[in-house]
Image: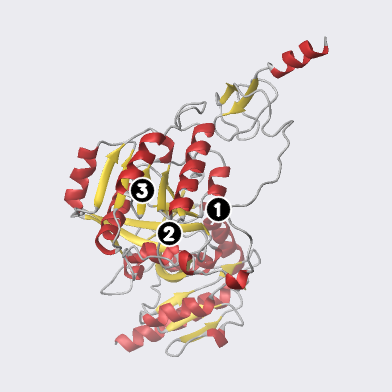
């Protein structure tokens, strides 16, 4: 009787979310963990992994050694010769490392990695292998021809079976493997469909094991969900060594590779690229993309210095104040945080007593497609709005850095010295900064400390008047 109950309990179906891996006790229309509809499926695994198992000890393949006796040479990075990608990776790809590159469809992931594969084949001395599960080899060849990425040591294969991929590794013996994408590869003998939680986990674990065993630098392309997260189980990001996000607006030429996790270098680096007709190119000095050159100063603009990872980028903020309207005026932003703009408008109207914005439309944007969400852009946003509302042009050599509080105070932000150094390098002469930042200023730039929004407006007006006198 007991054995029959045990058998019935073991045969009881289990359920798993195909989006996040959560295992609810029964079938549900919506996963309670991730909120996806229709993602809970029946699983054939009836016993939890490891339940009732006893693991016995065995002799390790390699004994443990003192850390001082272990060589770090195998973990030395090999440059890909794509400068901005090497910057984010921390010098290049480490043999045996597995990199996950995620991004929205059409942003340029395949184009970038095809260039990386060609550069590796030309300079690393070992072949590179690109396995595409989404395109045929002829389609990849056409893109490579357009990019000028043809090389005898660059191999292409179109496969969706993990066993076939491992067979190509045996035949080619590459130093670099690119799988585009990991969601299209299926592992024989593993339940679920391609791209499901179980399949993605099994494929990634197998590729990570092969990469470590053979010392193959591996790049896996990953899909993203509608909220920008890497599709598949969260364990996918734990299995790999490096996680990169490839970002960019389809209507802009700017592309950013942002490091999220990196076991071999800094995890907050950002690489800048420009997408053009001939492919994708590194931008070692992208600050000029985010500025507009004017013959004469124009009201409604102000320049700030944003931090993307550890890189300082001089960026222009523009604002346009519309006519008075009845009802609720529009607040439209492009590249800025709409909530922070609303807060800055309220502080401007309440604390300065110079602007009446409650019944006027306000449009604010950045230049060049960059997105500013950090609080350090608050002061520049406020000055751009005030400049447009008062019809007073800011001085062309002025930058503003600082967070605006609800009482109108200007708060300190991080990396002020690095921001000011970048502004001075590009020729800016005056900087409005929060109190206590003057000691971090480099030579060649005048620093004006402002404690609140009212003093910031007065200092900006004096700098603009002095700039007008210099022009005359």
- Residue carrying label 1: 339
104 up-or-down from 334: above or below: above
- Residue carrying label 3: 178
411 up-or-down from 200: above or below: below
In this rendering, would 238 be left or right of 398? right
Say which of 87 and 440 sits in front: 87
What is the basis of the colouring in this image? Answer: secondary structure
Residue 371 placement (x, y as % from top left): 44, 57
Q: Kindly report the distance in space between the C-alpha atoms of the residues bearing marks 1 and 2.
A: 44 Å
Residue occupying image coordinates x 35% and y 87%: 469
431 up-or-down from 338: above or below: below
SS of the residue at dot 2?
Answer: loop
Dot 2: few (<14), some (14–19), or many (≥20) neighbours within 10 Å? many
Residue occupying image coordinates x 38% and y 80%: 397
Q: Are marks 3 and 1 in contact (CB under 8 Å)?
A: no
In this rendering, would 31 be left or right of 194? right
Could you tell me if residue 386 is visible in this image? no
SS of the residue at dot 3?
Answer: strand
Residue occupying image coordinates x 68% and y 26%: 47
The quadrant of the picture occupied by the C terminus is bottom left
């Amino acid at each position: 009787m007991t054995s029959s109950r045990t058998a019935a309990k073991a045969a009881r179906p289990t359920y798993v979310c195909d989006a996040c891996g959560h295992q609810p006790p029964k079938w549900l229309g919506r996963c309670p963990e991730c909120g996806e509809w229709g993602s809970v499926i029946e699983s054939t695994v009836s016993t939890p992994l490891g339940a009732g198992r006893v693991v016995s000890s065995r002799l390790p393949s390699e004994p443990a050694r003192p850390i001082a006796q272990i060589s770090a040479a195998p973990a030395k990075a090999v440059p890909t010769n794509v400068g901005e990608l090497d910057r984010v990776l921390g010098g290049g790809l480490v043999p045996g490392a597995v990199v996950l590159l995620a991004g929205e469809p059409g942003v340029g992931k395949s184009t970038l990695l095809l260039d990386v594969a060609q550069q590796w084949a030309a300079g690393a001395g070992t072949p590179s292998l690109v396995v595409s599960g989404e395109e045929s080899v002829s389609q990849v060849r056409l893109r490579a021809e357009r990019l000028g990425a043809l090389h005898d040591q660059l191999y292409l294969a179109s496969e969706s079976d993990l066993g076939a991929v491992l067979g190509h590794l045996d035949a080619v013996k590459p130093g670099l493997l690119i799988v585009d994408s990991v969601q299209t590869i299926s592992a024989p003998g593993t339940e679920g469909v391609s791209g499901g939680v179980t399949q993605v986990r099994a494929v990634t674990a197998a590729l990570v094991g092969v990469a470590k065993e053979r010392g193959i630098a591996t790049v896996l392309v990953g899909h993203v969900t509608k909220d920008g997260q890497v599709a598949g189980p969260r364990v996918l990001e734990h299995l790999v060594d490096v996680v990169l996000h490839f970002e960019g607006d389809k209507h802009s030429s700017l592309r950013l590779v942002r490091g999220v996790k990196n076991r071999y270098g800094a995890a907050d680096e950002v690489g800048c690229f420009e997408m053009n007709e001939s492919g994708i190119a590194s931008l070692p000095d992208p600050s000029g993309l985010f500025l507009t050159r004017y013959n004469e100063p124009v009201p409604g603009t102000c320049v700030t210095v944003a931090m993307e990872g550890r890189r300082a980028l001089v960026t222009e903020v523009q604002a346009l104040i519309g006519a008075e309207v009845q009802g609720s005026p529009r607040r439209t932003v492009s590249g800025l945080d709409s909530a922070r703009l609303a807060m800055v408008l309220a502080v401007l109207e309440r604390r300065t007593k110079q602007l009446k914005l409650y019944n006027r439309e306000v449009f604010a944007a950045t230049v060049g497609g960059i997105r500013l969400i950090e609080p350090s852009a608050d002061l520049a946003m406020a000055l751009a709005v005030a400049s447009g509302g008062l019809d007073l042009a800011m001085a062309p050599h002025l930058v503003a850095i600082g967070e605006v509080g609800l009482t109108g105070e200007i708060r300190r932000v991080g990396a002020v010295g690095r921001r000011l150094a970048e502004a001075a390098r590009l020729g800016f002469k005056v900087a409005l900064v929060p109190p206590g930042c003057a000691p971090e200023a480099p030579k060649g730039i005048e620093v004006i400390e402002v404690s609140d929004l009212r003093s910031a407006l007065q200092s900006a007006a004096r700098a603009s008047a002095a700039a007008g006198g210099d022009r005359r």
